[in-house]
Image (spheres, grey):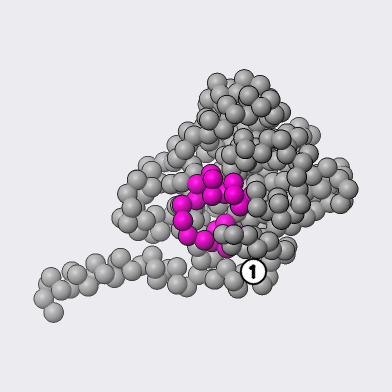
Amino acid sequence: MTPGGWIALAGLGLAALPAAREAVRTPVGALQKTAPGRFAELSEGRTHYQWFGPESGPVVVCVHGLTTPSFVWLGLVSDLTRKGYRVLTYDLYGRGYSDAPRGQQSPGFFAEQLRALLSDQNLHEDITLIGYSMGGAIATSVAAEEHHRLSRLILVAPAGMGHTLGRMATWATEWPIVGDWAFHMAFPRAHRAAVLAERTLPSTVQNIGDQQISELRRKGFVRSVLSSLRGTLRRDMQSAHRTLAAAQLPVTAIWGRDDRTIPLRAMGTLTQWNRDVRHIVIDDAGHGLPYTHTDQITRLL
């Protein structure tokens, strides 16, 4: 074989690496057989959900973030159900036990999943909606259109105020094909390193680090994260927040003073869009508020 042929062959091998990695990951169908909850058959795919607490309690619906599925809420769920709340958690498409449909994962894409789930569960009014990180942007999108169904909106370290993705993620989101390849190769190691760096943090969710890393072994997860970075986290939610201000829906935003993922300066941006938001800052807290500072969030709610 000529030198050019060897180069071409090597190039093909490198190009195939992401697909080869994806091929050995666990199909979501196999994971769904071990799911702890139930499934709603929605228009874009199966959505895994769980109910907790008394049937007669006030309803709280929780929307998780970019990389950590609904198990991120388990500590908060335990606290809320002891106080008599009825809590619904679910996995966003591409995470946990939910299907991973293709297509751009925009706020509208995720908002439609949540609206469909609420209808499937016959939830029509007096809902407390909680969104964490990217889930804050999703919850805001839904609240802007469905504020008549909500009693209040709680945002925990919310995205949507102009998210800084970091150099690698920004480059990957701006360059199709080449960016896809680079992200599929680099993200798993970066995600694992970020999770391991937080091993010493307190957590009300048992083995949360191991569970976060295990997401890397499911098919569709890495692709879904990249799609969400492109479709949701690069956008700001100014229009939706101004709609909420006009609707006068009670909104509370909870921030971690030491959060490096959603820096505290986002609070100022949100204040410009909706001056009626109640802001609460938790000292010595980073981005993992739902599981590192569960007690404080429970008291604030």
Position in image of residue 12 (x %, y %): 26, 69
Tell me the quadrant of the picture where the N terminus can be found.
bottom left
Judge from the rendering whether residue 235 lies leftward or rightward of residue 123; answer left or right. left
Judge from the rendering whether residue 255 lies leftward or rightward of residue 126; answer left or right. left
Local packing at callout 1 (Cα closer than 10 Å; few below 14, some 14-19, many 20+) is some
Judge from the rendering whether residue 129 lies leftward or rightward of residue 6; answer left or right. right
Position in image of residue 82 (x %, y %): 86, 46
Position in image of residue 301 (x %, y %): 77, 34
Above or below — where is 223 with respect to 131? below
Above or below — where is 116 with respect to 20? above
Would you say the magenta stretch is mainly helix, strand or loop? loop
Q: Quadrant of residue 80?
A: top right
Residue range (magenta): 93-114
Q: Amino acid at mark 1?
A: Gln
Q: In this view, which residue lies farthest toward the left?
A: 2
Q: Is residue 291 visible?
A: no
Circle 1 sits in a helix, a strand or a loop, which is it? helix
Above or below — where is 245 with respect to 152? above
**Disc 1 target residue:** 32
Residue 68 magenta: no
Measuring 70% from the left and 50% from the top, which residue is drawn there?
118
Measuring 64% from the left and 69% from the top, which residue is drawn there?
32
Residue 109 magenta: yes
Q: Is residue 27 visible?
A: yes
Judge from the rendering whether residue 75 lies leftward or rightward of residue 24; answer left or right. right
Measuring 62% from the left and 20% from the top, which residue is drawn there?
275
Measuring 77% from the left and 55% from the top, which residue is drawn there?
51
Q: Nearer the viewer, residue 134 or 204?
A: 134
Position in image of residue 106 (x %, y %): 50, 47
Q: Nearer the viewer, residue 287 or 73?
A: 73
